[in-house]
Image (cartoon, rainbow, N blue to C red):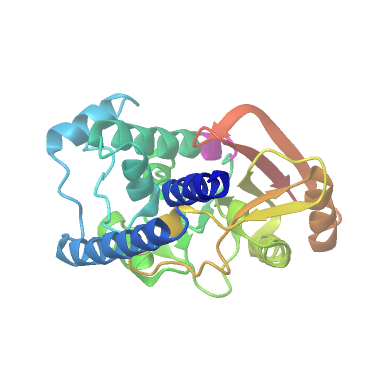
């Protein structure tokens, strides 16, 4: 009798926590939601239909207007779509955060731009920061580089960003939320690319998750993996959530450019969670 009761209780618990039949139903539900999200994505306009009032309210928070900045948001911009999902569809909150993050980063970049003539937004995505860079630095040539074809097309056609061309070097480079998504070998390779893209005496501003005590840690969960329906979705094997130690960064930079200096910009955060790292050749 006791054994039967124990078995019944165990089966009930397993069902509730997603084991057995309930697990299968949850997996089916997840696949169904993913398929519905893909169909919804196919019907969305390229620019999300955000009202002028919504845009005005968000820009007003940072002292700007639609005459200053184009606030068109691409339907596949994960920097907007993931927070929108996190906030349960609250457009006002999501757009305000998007604007604050982009505007704040542009101001930090601008503070390092003295004497710069050409700037590269390395991993520019769909323009969360670069649209504000063009506003903050009107006399600087702003270029962009990103692996997503749809992002680069949107940047050029809608935001007027110039693409990177082979052979160009830059006085200043910004890589926001790029190194936070790379595996260790990719991190080191990207750091070498950044150094190679800088002009003599150039500066780079990258963002990282707060340093961990030792080594390098990688987690699979990202905004890309949470939104598989988006076009040009990055491969989960390459795009991860990454955390490194200060020792790892210093060693990687030593390998890329032994004479470079590194400074952690205290008191400033990108997107509320990432630290700014200034690298000077």
| Nearer to the camera, 174 or 4 | 4
Is residue 95 depicted above or below 256 in this figure?
A: above
Residue 260 appears at what percent x and percent y?
Answer: 80, 51
Between residue 214 and residue 131, name the one nearer to us: 214
User: In the current view of this chain or complex, which residue is farthest to the bottom?
Assistant: 166
Q: Residue at x 26, y 44 (%)?
A: 71
Which region shows up in magenta? 108-112
Determine the residue located farthest toward the front in the rendered image. Answer: 1
Q: Is residue 8 magenta?
A: no
Quadrant of the rendered image containing residue 26: bottom left
**Image position of 243 (left or right of 224):** right
Residue under the image location 81 percent in, 40 percent down = 213
- Res. 260 visible in picture: no
- Residue 62 lies in what quarter of the image? top left
* In-image side of 136 versus 241 (left or right): left
Residue found at x 20% / y 51%: 48
Is 109 within the magenta?
Answer: yes
Where on the picture, by quarter, is residue 109? Answer: top right
Q: Position of residue 162 (x, y in %)?
A: 40, 62
Q: Nearer the viewer, residue 169 or 240?
A: 240
Q: Position of residue 139 (x, y in %)?
A: 43, 46
179 versus 169 height, above or below: above
Q: Is residue 166 above or below residue 159?
A: below
């Amino acid at each position: 009798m006791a054994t039967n009761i124990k078995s019944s209780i165990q089966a009930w618990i397993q069902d509730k926590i997603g084991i057995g039949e309930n697990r299968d139903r949850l997996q089916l539900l997840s696949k169904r939601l993913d398929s519905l999200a893909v169909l919804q994505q196919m019907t969305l306009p390229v620019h999300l239909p955000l009202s002028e009032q919504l845009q005005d309210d968000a820009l007003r928070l940072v002292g700007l207007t639609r005459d200053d900045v184009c606030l068109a948001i691409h339907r596949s911009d994960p920097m907007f779509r993931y927070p929108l999902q996190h906030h349960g569809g609250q457009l006002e909150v999501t757009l305000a955060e998007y604007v604050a993050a982009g505007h704040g980063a542009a101001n930090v970049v601008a503070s390092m731009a003295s004497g710069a003539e050409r700037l590269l937004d390395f991993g520019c995505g769909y323009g969360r920061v670069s649209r504000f860079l063009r506003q903050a630095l009107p006399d600087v040539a702003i270029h962009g580089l990103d692996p997503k074809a749809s992002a680069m097309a949107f940047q050029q056609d809608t935001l007027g960003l110039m693409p990177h061309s082979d052979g160009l070097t830059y006085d200043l480079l910004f890589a926001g939320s790029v190194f936070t998504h790379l595996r260790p070998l990719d991190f080191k390779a990207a750091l070498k690319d950044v150094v190679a893209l800088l002009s003599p005496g150039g500066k780079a501003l990258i963002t990282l998750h707060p340093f961990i005590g030792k080594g390098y840690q990688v987690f699979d969960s990202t905004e890309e993996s949470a939104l598989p329906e988006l076009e040009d979705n990055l491969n989960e094997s390459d795009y991860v959530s990454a955390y490194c130690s200060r020792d790892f960064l210093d060693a990687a930079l030593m390998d890329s450019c032994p004479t470079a200096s590194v400074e952690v910009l205290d008191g400033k955060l990108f997107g509320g969670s990432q630290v700014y790292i200034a690298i000077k050749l």
